Amino acid sequence: MIRIEKLGKTFRVGEGKTNTVLRDINLEVPKGCLYGLIGPGAAGKSVLLKMLTGLLRPDVGRIVIDDVDVTQSSEIALQDLRKRIGFLFQNYALFDSMTVADNIAFPLRRLIDPPEAEVQARVVERLKAVALAGFGDRLPAGLSGGQKKRVGVARATITNAPIVLYDEPAAGLDPVTSQKIFELLRAEQQASGATVIMVSSDLDRMLTVTDRVGMMHQGRLIFDGTTAEAQASTNPYVRQFVHGLVDGPL
């Protein structure tokens, strides 16, 4: 389980100026849940994902992942925690000079360092799982946007991490490719039983695969419930965002 308690974060943006991006966030994500995090731009969604991995530290509050207090952990303890977390970055974050196979293998070699034969076998298995069998020797420059996302998914899941975080997994993709990516993420989650949190602006397709949804607005979590409850919500902010209404408070 992921538990977030009274989390807050403020950044300095200039001389005497600050920007509070997270305000009193309280959230529990059950084990094995596929959780969608939605909200307008600059609502704090990506910042929250980075805090779950310890890449950013909160000013107040805490994050507890399976009884490990992330906010109080040392850097050494965080390194152990990160072995249990897969992360798909919004902008792919693939290494241009590495082949697809080496990109996928990178976290496995960096965090676990199993025998090379096992690395190669797991890379082949991951490529097959994301429908990119035979692409291992290619470079990222020769891939389409959808293929790069699939490589990112393969890399995020190669360590069999029990927790996986996806930041805008379908950003910039056409509707058909976007739907295929979300179906892939759901299939991966169901096969592994991982706890997944994904941030996405593609609500129409994301809501077809999520179990629960949280909405952030101006740094606050203003809604947390099942996907069906989000779609039926009468909260004016949630209703406008989920249904794409032009008129509303946002």
Image (tube, rainbow, N blue to C red):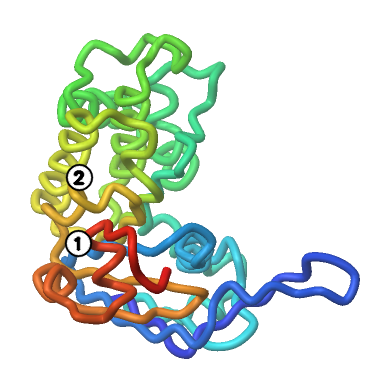
The residue labelled by disc 2 is 185
Q: Which badge, 2 or 1, is on the more N-terminal residue?
A: 1
Q: Position of residue 197 (x, y in %)?
A: 30, 61
Q: Quadrant of residue 15?
A: bottom right
Where is 81 relative to 183, above or below?
Answer: below
Q: Residues within 10 Å of mark 2 (few under 14, many from 20)?
A: many
**Which amino acid, by three-letter code, is at mark 2?**
Leu
Q: Is residue 79 visible?
A: no
On the picture, is 203 further left or further right than 5?
Answer: left
**Which amino acid, by three-letter code, is at mark 1?**
Leu
Q: Quadrant of residue 235?
A: bottom left
On the picture, is 128 further left or further right than 200?
Answer: left
Looking at the rendered image, the quarter that the C terminus falls into is bottom left
Q: Position of residue 99 (x, y in %)?
A: 44, 16
Q: Is there CB contact under 8 Å for labels 2 and 1?
A: yes
The secondary structure type at the circle numbered 2 is: helix
Residue 34's tag is 1
Q: Is residue 32 visible?
A: yes
